[in-house]
Image (cartoon, rainbow, N blue to C red):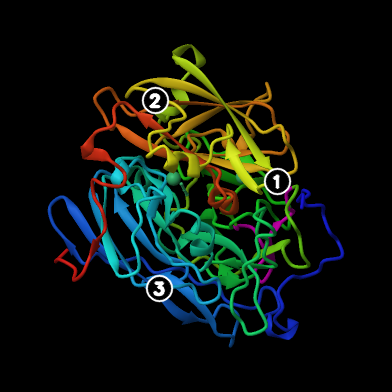
Amino acid sequence: AVALPWQRVLSARRVSRIAESKLPRPYTVPLTIPPVLTPARRDDTTDYYRIVQKPFVGEILPSVKTDLWGYNGLVPGPTIVARRNRQTKVRQVNALPETHPTLGYRPWTSTHLHGSPSEPHFDGYASDLTYPGQWKDYEYPNSAEARTLWYHDHGKHHTAENVYMGLAGQYHIVDPLEDKLRLPRGKHDVPLTITDAMFAEDGSLMFDDDDRTSFFGDVILVNGKPWPVVGVEPRKYRFRLLNACLSRGMNLRLSNGQPFHVIAPDGVIVETPIRLTSLRIGMAERYEIVVDFAGITAGQSIQLVNTGVENTKDYDHTGKVLRFTVKGSATDTDFNNLPAALAPQHPAMALTPAMAKTTRRMRLRRDDTTNEWSIDNVTWADVEASGFTKLFGNPQPGDVEIWEIDSRSGGWFHPLHVHFVDFKVLSRNGGPPRPEENGAKDVVYVAEGERSVRLIMQFSKPGGTHGRYMIHCHNLTHEDHDMMIQYQIGAHHADSDPINTAPPRSGPETPL
Ligand code: C2O
Ligand code: CU
Ligand code: CU
């Protein structure tokens, strides 16, 4: 059967099978903030964390029990806060069941820290599998500038299901710059992880990727709560938006049309705030925004709404995300700043086409006979079949390259993610990038039918990190079937093989 692109189907109001009466009315459930994870131990150089990936019964819908998988039994996972240039070591223990309760597959995992460079053997390579009963220690240098990252599962062919079950959380790198800028902090610095879900009659999560095309749930969750509501003070807030949906892109705006400022596309703080009234956010993109509620009458409500993007199924309530209710007065007006000058220029933003050694082109496509997605007709299966030697490119450390993406097929958009690097979006179809993309990024929203989205990037430093890294679509259904390839920086050495250098271990854990 030939799968056709989604049309906007106005008649489909919902897709969950659970009784409508079991869903809360939007904006009645309070927002919660995931806890910050405490290290198991610290020493001079490193913070040590232990995370157990485990099944638990949670309550996403009020009074409805749902089987979930969470990092330490939480959905989303606990937030990790790392200091720039201070190392973290995170032990990931796979304590998941031998098979998924409804889908029946064996939940191997691989944990990726998305948004800052890691060595290949700690990067969550899709074929570096940790099986139930095994554990693996991941080491992160946290060398990147202050930013919002996230950690999530990346096990081959089941990333979508594993992330959907709950294996995703935010990770922040902080540095003294933010304090100097006096940006909102503490309770005024709020992570907002957005996902979508569908529920079966019995309250369990339904998974339906419509013939490996996309997954679109009808219940919008923020930090694991359906269409929540949160009280805010009349002052500035910093929100760390993460689109952790499997396939749903969004256009976000405030219901009163109020402008807000993007301060960090994909979490990296820009030089000057970007003023907008709406923001397109594809899967895995992060946007930090500052919203000022000062001057809003006490008691008034403002919604964060989603006006939708093309080729994404909308249901009755997928236009609603979160409601802010403004309180009478601010308890604290310190760190209430949005300076006109933020961070120094990020090195990626200083790259120019004249510096590039090579331009590489890639085509995003779909094979309608096999329902497989590919990049330049290559899939992850091809990479595996080559003994992991097949490469999209082999830049040397320090090289600058332009990658030009062509997605002429239409009918779907693809948020393309390149591991390891921060890139600059040079142009879209000959024109400029979108305003919100004006900063260093690691995911680019390649829209329907775009014939040329150009990125420029530099691969580590001369003498720096080398090895193999993935490139893939962050529509997780596309990624799993099988829209993922790899490139290699410099040489491939035994000291940085993604699979063999730091394999997972079985049996009793050693002390952390
Ligand atoms: Cu967020 Cu390769 O992934
Ligand atoms: Cu990544
Ligand atoms: Cu895709």
Type of amino acid at the residue the image marks with label 3: Glu
Query: Residue 404, position in %: x, y?
Result: 58, 25
| Residue 403 drawn above or below residue 267 | above
Q: Which segment is the magenta one?
A: 293-309
User: On screen, 198 above or below 244?
Assistant: below
Where is residue 153 shown, x and y percent of the image?
A: 43, 58
Please tell me which residue is depicted at 69% across the width and 74% down the height of the picture.
26
**86 to the left or right of 326:** left
Q: Is residue 9 left or right of residue 77?
A: right
Read off the residue under disc 1. Answer: 369
Label 2, residues with CA under 10 Å away: few <14, some 14-19, many ≥20: some
Magenta stretch: residue 308 in it? yes
Confirm if mark 2 falls within 8 A of ligand 1.
Answer: no
Label 3 neighbourhood size at 10 Å, few (<14), some (14-19), many (20+)? Answer: some
Across and down, in percent, residue 336 comes to 47, 53
Q: Nearer the viewer, residue 27 or 313?
A: 313
Q: Earlier in the sequence, mark 1 or mark 2?
A: 1
Q: Secondary structure at mark 2?
A: loop
Q: Earlier in the sequence, mark 3 or mark 2?
A: 3
At label 1, counting other C-alpha atoms closer than 10 Å, the crowd grade (few under 14, some 14-19, many 20 or more) is: few
Quadrant of image for the C terminus: bottom left
Q: Residue furthest top?
A: 354
Asked if residue 373 can be seen in this view, the reply is yes
* Principal secondary structure, stretch drawn in magenta: loop
Q: Residue at x 60, y 67 (%)?
A: 221
Establish if 328 lies above or below 214: below
CA gap between label 3 and label 2 equals: 38 Å
